[in-house]
Image (tube, rainbow, N blue to C red):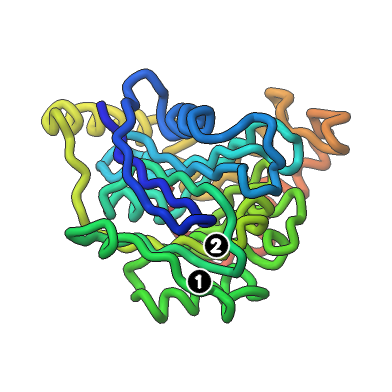
Amino acid sequence: MKARTLIIDLSSREVTEQSVDSGPWLGGRGLGTRLLVDHCDPGCDPLGPDNVMVIALSPLTGTTAPTAGRGHAVFKSPLTGGIGSANSGGRWGKVLKSTGYDALVIKGASDKPVYLSISEGKTLTERVSIRDAGSLWGRDAHATTDSLLSTHGDKASVLTIGPAGENRVLFASIMNDRNRAYGRGGPGAALGAKKLKAVVVNGNAKTEVADAERLKLVVEQTRHVMKAAPTTKRVMRELGTAGLVHLINFMGILPHRNFKDCAHREDLLDQISGEAVTAKILIKAGACFG
């Protein structure tokens, strides 16, 4: 299976496409890691122009498969110096897939703030452009998103950094759909070092499926399981991810105090659990894209 990959060099302003064999690599994380190894010198400065930012998607992104709308960012982490790996929900991954691409590779660094616009088109020049972002530099994620949507239309999706990324804060996130974060490892700092403020995607292409009937069957089976399981049937629907606090604490994977402890006292959990959050501050429930 081939993954259609868009490669953009911000230093030279060169834009190319590459078809990559995605068969051996599992999902966006696997494909993204493969592309990082192919394009990034492991000894590079994470805040230098030789670092590479990859955002890759799953083969199921853009289909009806549940939870398959996420994107995965892979890069050399400014925070750790190792491979950075950050995952995010939101619409951005699905809309990138709707432009016809499975992965985005960003190389080099601009000498001034820019943003990328990726859409459908007959030629590469029509599909991809590098645009000035001087007026956006210094704005937070919400203001940047609002400004770019007013330019590109409400059906577009915006991935952006805020002032933390611009100033290369080592734990800065990349945001999409205003509130969804690629949070781990400082990906926002990596984009800030490239002077890349945002990536706007806008497309309507359908994801091609090799065996539509088989996918339909698997999706139906998966939905049946999700509707029957208490966690996805009730907890996630009524309380959101905060409803998992007691469960992950029981499993010993709720770290605090900089990972000095991985479990909390049960009486303390009652202050931050999904039930507590719902009782104190819930105004209206709503579903997230994935």
Q: Earlier in the sequence, mark 1 or mark 2?
A: 1
Q: Which residue lies furthest to the top in this view?
A: 24
Q: Mark 2 points at which residue?
A: 160
Residue, x 68% and y 53% (percent of image)? 189
Q: What element carries label 2?
A: strand
Return the residue nearer the eye: 249 or 57. Answer: 57
- Please provide percent x and percent y for residue 3: 31, 35
Residue, x 31% and y 30% (percent of image)? 222
Residue, x 53% and y 68% (percent of image)? 114
- The answer for how far apart the CA atoms under marks 1 and 2 are is 7 Å
- Amino acid under disc 2: Thr
Q: Specify few, some or many for label 1: CA neighbours under 10 Å numbering under 14, 14-19, or 20 or more.
A: many
Q: Do the residues labelled 1 and 2 touch (CB within 8 Å)?
A: yes
Return the residue nearer the eye: 251 or 139. Answer: 139
Is residue 187 placed above or below 199 in the rendered structure? above
- Please provide percent x and percent y for residue 243: 60, 43
Residue 144 visible within the image: yes
Residue 217's tag is none
Q: In which quarter of the image is residue 40?
A: top right
- Please provide percent x and percent y for residue 217: 18, 28
Residue, x 44% and y 63% (percent of image)? 116
Is residue 232 placed above or below 89 in the rendered structure? above
- Amino acid under disc 1: Thr
Q: In this view, does 112 lie to the left or right of 99?
A: right
Quarter in which the N terminus is drawn: top left
Q: In this view, does 221 lie to the left or right of 113?
A: left
Return the residue nearer the eye: 274 or 17. Answer: 17
Q: What element carries label 1?
A: helix
Q: Name the residue under label 1.
A: 145
- Please provide percent x and percent y for residue 44: 68, 37
